[in-house]
Amino acid sequence: MRSSVSDGPASWYRASIAVELDPSLPLEGDTRADVCVIGGGVTGCSTALHLAERGYSVVLLEAGDIGHGASGRSGGQILPGLGTDITTVQQALGLSRAREVWEMSREAVRLTAELIERHAISCELAWGYLHAAVKPRHVKELEAFREQMSRDYGYEALAWLEGDALREHVVTDAYPAALHDREGGHLHPLNYTLGLARAAQRAGVRVHPHSAAREIRRGRPATVTTERGQVTADFVVLATNAYHGGLVPELSGRIMRAANYMIATAPLSEAQAAQVLPKNDALADANFVLDYYRLSADRRLIYGGEVSYDGREPPRLQARMDAKIARLFPVLKGVPIEYRWGGDVAITLNRAPDFGRLGDNLYYAQGYSGHGMAMAGLAGKLMADAIAGQSERFDVFAAMPHRQFPGGRALRKPLLVLATNFYKLRDRL
C-alpha cells in the first residue's frame, strides 16, 4: 500500500484519527481460537465483531496497522449496488437472485449506519450521493438505469437532476445531468474501520496488528503462522482483499491490484463549500476510470481518481489531478492541496465481489472493485452467519461465477493495462 503520492504528507485520514483502539500487540507464541481472521480492514473487523457477538473466540491478524489498506484510504462512499452493473449479476444469476443481491447491497448501507450508531463510532456519516453524467452518452445510460431499477428492482430512491436542480447539489458546468441517490452517503473510512476494530475488541476479539500471516496450513483445525507465533483455529477467514500475498494461490489470479490516488485540500470557507457541494453530497462521475469526491466534516474537498495497475505512479499525476479540480471548481483557485496519498483496491474480471469457501473451513471475500466500503461490512456479517451454519445468503454471492484474469502471471497486467487504455479513450469520446 502506498502511504502517499510521491513523497508528500501521509493521508488526511491518518492525520484526523478520532477513534482510539484498546492497546494491542503483535502476536507472540502459539494460541487457539474458534476462528482466525486474516486482515484488519472492514471485512475482517466486521467478520470478527459479528463472530464474537455470536460467542465465538476470535483472533484477528493484521500485517500493518488496522485500516492500513483500502478500508482506511478510500473515498469513503457508502452506496447500494456493486462495482459492476446489476445487469451483470442478472445475466449470471437470473433476475430473482439479482434482486436478492441488490437488496443485500441496500442492507449493507443500512448495516453500516447501524454499526456506527450502536458502537458510537465518530466517523462523519452523512447522506446523499450523485452519479453524474459527463457526456450525452452517459445521460442516456443513467436514464435507462433509473428506469430499469424502478421497473425490475422496485428501487425508487433515485431522483433525476439537471439544470438548476443539479446546481443545487453540485456547482459546476461539468455535468449535464445526474442521478441523486438518497440511500447513498459518505464517511471517514479510517475512523469507521477503527471503530469496528474497537467494537470487536470490546466483544472479546484478540486483535494483533503488525502480525502478517506467512502461511495457512489447511486442515481441521487449520494453522496460521506469523513471524513470531501461530494460531490454531477451526475456521479461517481470508479478508486481505488486495493484500493477498499468495497465501491461497488458487485465489491470486481472480483479483488484480489497482492503485487509486487521492488529495485533500485545505479547509474551505463556508462560502467556498457552498459553491462546490452545497448539500454535502458525495459524487462520482460515470466514466469507466472515474473521478469521485466529497467534503469532509471540516470542509476539505476529498478528491480521488486516476488508476495504475503496474505499481508505478502515473506520469504528471499531481498536475492532472490539480487541473481537474480547477476545471470543475474555478472558485477553488488558490486553495492549497495539503495531503496527497494513494492506495490499492482489488478488482475482479467482472467487477462483482468474489465470495466463497475452500474446503469446509476457509472462507474469503475479496474483489469489491472500488465499491466495498459498505459491502465489506455485510460480507463480514454473512461470513459470520455462514460459519455459524446459516450460509444461505452468503451462498447467493458465492454462486456468482468468477474467472481468472487472462494472460497468466506474465501477461495479466499488460493485458489489463491495454483494456483500461481502451476504456480511457472511450471516456474521452
Image (cartoon, grey):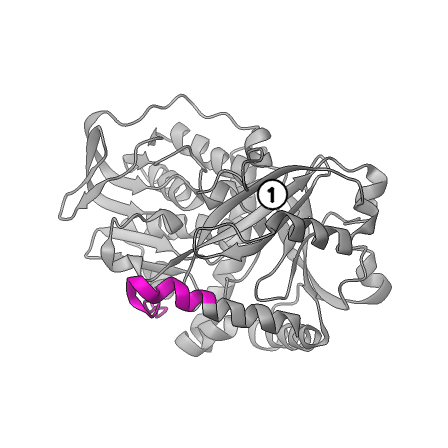
For mark 1, what is the residue? 187
Residue 382 appears in the picture as rendered? yes
Give the left or right position of residue 101, taking residue 228 as reference.
right
Q: Up-down: is 358 above or below 220?
A: below
The quadrant the N terminus occupies is top left
Residue 254 counted in the magenta span: no
Percent x, y of residue 132: 69, 63
Q: Residue at x 34, y 68 (%)?
A: 399
Task: Give the residues in magenta.
Answer: 399-417
Which residue is outermost to the top?
A: 23
Give the left or right position of residue 221, taking residue 406 as reference.
left
Give the left or right position of residue 147, taking residue 376 as reference.
right
- Category of crowding for the residue at label 1, using alpha-carbon neighbours closer than 10 angstroms: few (below 14), some (14–19), many (at least 20): many
Percent x, y of residue 415: 40, 69
Q: Nearer the viewer, residue 63 or 375?
A: 63
Q: Residue at x 30, y 57 (%)?
A: 252
Which residue is outermost to the front?
A: 315
Q: Up-down: is 188 above or below 378?
A: above
Q: Residue at x 47, y 70 (%)?
A: 419
